[in-house]
């Protein structure tokens, strides 16, 4: 399970009014971008069904962010 609760701004990204919209998570270091992206990806992937799997595309400035997201999702989805 996800250990921390998202703040109000993060909830707007994770659960938008239009679930088909794309999201950009931008900000300076330490503001929760990776955390928010992980929650968003987790939410989208948990809503998938056998006949419909969402496409989640995540781009980052460096590979460490993507590595963290991969580990985070493996722990929270596969556990």
Image (spheres, grey):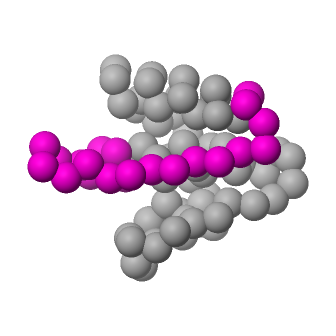
Q: Is residue 65 left or right of residue 30?
A: left
Q: Is residue 79 above or below residue 48?
A: above
SS assignment for the magenta stretch, majority:
loop
In the rendered view of the protein, which quadrant contains the C terminus?
A: top left
Quadrant in which residue 70 is drawn? top right
Quadrant in which residue 42 is drawn? top left
Q: Residue at x 75, y 61 (%)?
A: 26
Label tally: 0
Q: Is residue 78 left or right of residue 25?
A: left
Position of residue 45 measured from the top left corner of the image (x, y, whole percent): 34, 45
Q: Is residue 13 above or below residue 21?
A: above
Residue 5 in view in this figure: no
Residue 1 in view in this figure: yes
Position of residue 23 measured from the top left corner of the image (x, y, whole percent): 57, 66
Q: Which residue is most to the bottom? A: 17
Position of residue 64 measured from the top left corner of the image (x, y, whole percent): 74, 28
Q: Is residue 12 above or below residue 59?
A: below
In the rendered view of the protein, which quadrant contains the N terminus?
A: top left
Q: Which residues are magenta?
A: 44-64
Position of residue 66 measured from the top left corner of the image (x, y, whole percent): 64, 34
Q: Residue at x 64, y 26 (%)?
A: 67
Instruction: Indicate whether residue 39 is drawn in magenta.
Output: no
Quadrant in which residue 12 is drawn? bottom right
């Amino acid at each position: 399970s996800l250990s921390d609760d998202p703040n109000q701004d993060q909830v707007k990204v994770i659960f938008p009014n239009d679930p088909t919209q794309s999201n950009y998570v931008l900000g300076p270091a330490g503001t929760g971008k990776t955390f928010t992206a992980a929650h968003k990806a987790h939410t989208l992937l948990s809503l998938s069904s056998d006949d419909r799997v969402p496409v989640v595309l995540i781009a980052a400035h460096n590979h460490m962010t993507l590595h963290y997201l991969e580990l985070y999702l493996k722990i929270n989805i596969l556990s």
